[in-house]
């Protein structure tokens, strides 16, 4: 009987490939576009098994209008005396260093953080991120949707101040822990993605910066996507087929992107379009090439590319090829 009790109390065997620590992050922002800024940030540091080690919170002066005050509650008067991002960048970095960044819709939080560090002419010490939406899907949790409140309710975590960075980070940390333990018990591969710091970017606003657009929330291309939908001009050239290794790109080729790029994604897409390429939002059998810096990531695009045999190249190779795109054959 004693042996049975001892076995029942034994801790879950922990996968050796799992990270040694996590930084659960939430940022509140002035909006969702490339010219928007962080107004508050919170970090919960967790150990390898998801136990809380420390937490931190700060307001940030965005040096512009605060955006949707009715969501985050932070007014211009509250933020005017807050530190600028460069003033908190080092402390923020200390909270992130050596850890996997965890967030709900992590692509968005990481994008905003990477852009703020780029503006500050610094680099966030983050190499990998984990999205709790992706983890919930991997675990097949019976959620009605992928909102943070649904994940919290599933685990009985009580939200106290929704859209307050510190409370959202706390809620996510408490909900992430049982998800992490479920994944460990199943020896599940965590959906970790590589984080690529920005080296070339633009703050050109996607809508006029007028009072009529303060707090304006842009539409999105797909459910769960944080990237604003963009109307691209139709490619005037027919698709010449797939890219062949060692050859050049040809006008009309269908190019898809997956994961982070060191050049701002919209800038990279614009340059591809200017060169006569067709920028696709998804992978199909007609896709000529997938551009990604993380080909082994478990994203939908990389998975489909492997199943279709779509050629895959990294960003550096694509940028080099982009300068020598072959004109479309005369019809």
Image (cartoon, helix red, strand yellow):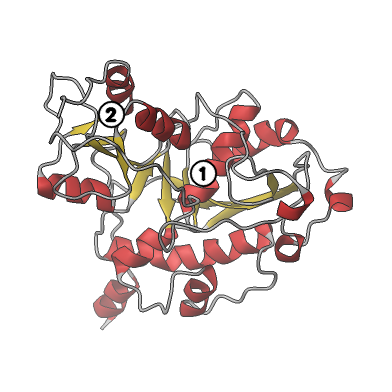
**Residue occupying the point 43% across, 74% down:** 145
Does residue 324 appear to the left or right of 99 in the view shown? Answer: left
Instruction: Give the residue at the far front of this rendering.
Output: 331
For residue 267, above or below residue 256: above
* Position in image of residue 74 (x %, y %): 79, 57
Does residue 305 appear to the left or right of 164 in the view shown? Answer: left
**Residue occupying the point 27% across, 44% down:** 297
Q: Secondary structure at mark 1?
A: helix
**Residue occupying the point 35% across, 30% down:** 272
Instruction: Give the residue at the far bottom of this rendering.
Output: 1
> Which circle marks residue 110 in the picture?
1
Residue 22 can be seen, yes or no: no
Does residue 113 appear to the left or right of 175 in the view shown? Answer: right
Q: Nearer the viewer, mark 2 or mark 1?
A: 2
For residue 244, above or below residue 307: above
Residue 138 can be seen, yes or no: yes
Marks 2 and 1 in Cβ contact (< 8 Å)? no
User: In the rendered view of the protein, which quadrant contains the C terminus?
Assistant: top left
Does residue 70 appear to the left or right of 117 in the view shown? Answer: right
For marks 2 and 1, give the CA distance: 20 Å
* Position in image of residue 103 (x %, y %): 50, 54
* Position in image of residue 206 (x %, y %): 59, 42
Q: Secondary structure at mark 2?
A: loop
For residue 190, above or below residue 164: above
In terms of depth relative to the viewer, which is nearer, 56 or 211?
Answer: 211
User: In the rendered view of the protein, which quadrant contains the N terminus?
Assistant: bottom left
**Residue occupying the point 54% across, 36% down:** 114
> Which circle marks residue 146 in the picture?
none
Instruction: Return the residue at label 2.
Output: 314
In terms of depth relative to the viewer, which is nearer, 306 or 4?
Answer: 306
Going from N to C along the chain, the mark reached first, 2 or 1, is 1
* Position in image of residue 176 (x %, y %): 46, 63
């Amino acid at each position: 009987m004693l042996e049975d009790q001892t076995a029942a109390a034994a801790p879950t065997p922990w996968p050796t490939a799992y990270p040694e620590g996590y930084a659960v992050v939430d940022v509140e922002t002035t909006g969702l576009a490339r010219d928007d800024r962080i107004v508050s940030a919170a970090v919960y540091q967790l150990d390898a098994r998801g136990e809380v080690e420390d937490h931190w919170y700060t307001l940030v002066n965005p040096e512009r209008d605060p955006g949707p005050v009715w969501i985050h509650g932070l007014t211009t008067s509250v933020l005017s005396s807050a530190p600028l991002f460069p003033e908190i960048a080092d402390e923020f970095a200390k909270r992130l260093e050596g850890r996997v960044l965890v967030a709900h819709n992590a692509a968005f939080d990481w994008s905003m953080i990477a852009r703020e560090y780029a503006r500050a002419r610094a680099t966030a010490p983050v190499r990998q991120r984990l999205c709790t939406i992706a983890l919930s899907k991997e675990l097949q949790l019976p959620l009605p949707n992928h909102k943070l409140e649904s994940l919290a309710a599933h685990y009985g975590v009580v939200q106290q101040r929704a859209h307050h960075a510190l409370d959202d980070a706390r809620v996510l940390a408490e909900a992430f822990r049982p998800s992490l333990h479920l994944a460990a018990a199943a020896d599940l591969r965590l959906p970790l993605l590589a984080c690529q710091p920005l080296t070339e970017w633009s703050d050109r606003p996607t809508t006029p910066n007028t009072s009529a657009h303060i707090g304006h929330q842009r539409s999105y291309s797909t459910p769960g996507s944080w990237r604003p939908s963009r109307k691209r001009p139709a490619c005037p050239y027919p698709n010449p087929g797939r890219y062949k290794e060692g050859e050049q790109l040809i006008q009309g080729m269908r190019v898809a992107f997956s994961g982070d790029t060191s050049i701002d994604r919209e800038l990279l897409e614009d340059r591809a379009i200017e060169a006569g390429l067709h920028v696709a939002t998804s992978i199909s059998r007609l896709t000529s090439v997938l551009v990604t810096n993380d080909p082994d990531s478990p994203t939908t695009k990389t998975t489909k590319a492997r199943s279709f045999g779509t050629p895959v190249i990294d960003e550096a190779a694509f940028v080099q090829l982009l300068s020598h795109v072959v004109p479309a054959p005369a019809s």
